[in-house]
Image (cartoon, helix red, strand yellow):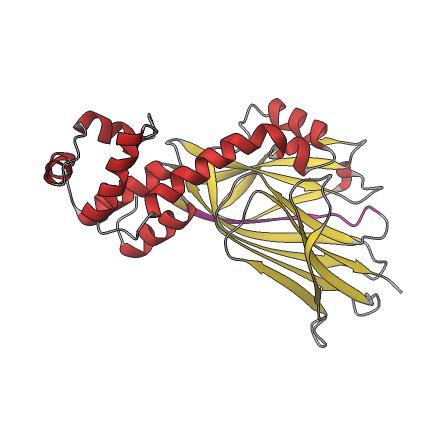
């Protein structure tokens, strides 16, 4: 559960709204009846039942008087201006944008295979989790191939009972997913693994050591050993939901160094690349990296040119 000011600051950044409200109430130690009294003192009338529904995620404030109550809640709970309202705005934007291009169909060219594999594992797209932080290390080998990648990820549950995460690996052209090895590194173990040979997509179920309650965080590590495809020229990560920090590092073999590396972003798989910037390859360690503090829906990646 969320009990500290640091926890509250994090969930105010990542959302969702109901978890942020619940965290604020817990950290401030205010029962709902007392909150209702404070709101009434500011001329705002809202029922305890409505407040309870808001913090459970059963309902979301949408009407003008409800949004006025949320603004007053920020004052009562001593929260930064518009910190709760911003989370409602972000949620509305995601719902409005998702049909137009925020699903896996727009984020991944092999979207059909990804959706079929996820459906086969009987899991929703978000899995009941929001990513708080993700550090990813990619290794490119002496033959310019994607050798493998390692991830350390921190997630927060937004509903009770979540006990697994679905990790997706999309290999380069020529990848044989049946030969890709899944490695559960820490605080998880490998469950079911499914792949699509035609697209080179693999989905691995990572089982947690605990069943999470809404608001709880979990740190786990995992990786994929590939090396089955031809030369690699980029690495991308798609995000269907906003929130959290993402760090990507690409390490090259000393016998296969690129002549140029760049970071980029895209709003969808078919969109033009934007926010491009050159990355300098470090000498001794032969790495480049990017850091994104507040991920937005879309695609982030690094590409490179060979001589």
| Extent of the magenta region | 218-229
- Which of these two is toward me, 251 or 58? 58
259 on left or right of 60: right
Q: Indicate whether 72 appears above or below 112.
A: below
Observer able to see residue 16: no
State the residue at coordinates (45%, 40%).
90
Total labels: the figure holds 0
User: For this rendering, which residue is in front, 37 or 33?
Assistant: 37
Residue 159 location (% of width, % of height): 38, 32
Q: Residue furthest right?
A: 307
Residue depicted at 70% across the width and 31% down the height: 111
Q: Position of residue 164 (x, y in %)?
A: 50, 36
Q: Position of residue 124 (x, y in %)?
A: 53, 27
Seen from this angle, which residue lies furthest bottom? 284
Q: Image point 89% across, 65% down: which residue?
A: 307
Relative to 268, is 128 on the left or the right? left
Give the dominant element type of the magenta stretch: helix, strand or loop. Answer: strand
Q: Nearer the viewer, residue 152 or 75?
A: 75
Residue 270 drawn above or below residue 250: above
Locate residue 113, reporting x and y percent: 71, 28
The answer to whether residue 4 is above or below residue 277 is above
On the question of residue 17 being in view, the answer is yes
Q: Is residue 279 within the magenta segment?
A: no
Left or right side of 297 for 161: left
Q: Residue at x 33, y 36 (%)?
A: 18
Q: Quadrant of the N terminus?
A: top left
Instruction: State the residue in front, 141 or 247.
Output: 247
The part of the image, by quadrant, that contains residue 213 is top left
């Amino acid at each position: 559960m969320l009990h500290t000011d640091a926890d509250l600051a994090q969930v105010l950044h990542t959302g969702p709204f109901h978890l942020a409200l619940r965290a604020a109430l817990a950290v401030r130690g205010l029962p709902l009846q007392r909150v209702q009294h404070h709101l009434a003192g500011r001329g705002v009338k809202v029922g305890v039942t409505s407040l309870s529904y808001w913090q459970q995620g059963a309902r979301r404030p949408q009407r003008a008087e409800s949004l006025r109550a949320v603004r007053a809640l920020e004052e009562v709970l001593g929260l930064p201006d518009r910190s709760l309202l911003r989370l409602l705005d972000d949620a509305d934007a995601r719902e409005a944008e998702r049909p137009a291009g925020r699903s896996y169909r727009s984020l991944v060219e092999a979207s059909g295979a990804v959706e079929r594999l996820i459906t086969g594992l009987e899991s929703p797209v978000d899995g009941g989790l929001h990513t708080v932080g993700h550090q990813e290390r990619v290794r490119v080998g002496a033959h310019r191939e994607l050798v493998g990648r390692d991830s350390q990820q921190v997630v927060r549950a937004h509903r009770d009972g979540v006990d697994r995460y679905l990790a997706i690996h999309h290999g380069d052209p020529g990848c044989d997913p049946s030969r890709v090895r899944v490695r559960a590194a820490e605080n998880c173990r490998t469950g079911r693994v499914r792949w699509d040979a035609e697209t080179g997509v693999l989905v691995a179920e990572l089982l947690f050591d605990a069943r999470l309650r809404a608001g709880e965080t979990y740190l786990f590590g995992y990786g994929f050993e590939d090396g089955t495809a031809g030369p690699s020229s980029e690495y991308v990560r798609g995000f269907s939901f906003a929130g959290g920090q993402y760090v990507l590092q690409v390490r090259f073999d000393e016998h296969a160094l690129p002549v140029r590396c760049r970071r980029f972003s895209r709003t969808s798989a078919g969109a033009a690349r934007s926010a491009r910037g050159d990355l300098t390859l470090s000498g001794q360690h032969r790495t480049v990296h990017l850091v994104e503090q507040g991920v937005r829906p879309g695609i982030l990646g690094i590409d490179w040119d060979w001589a």
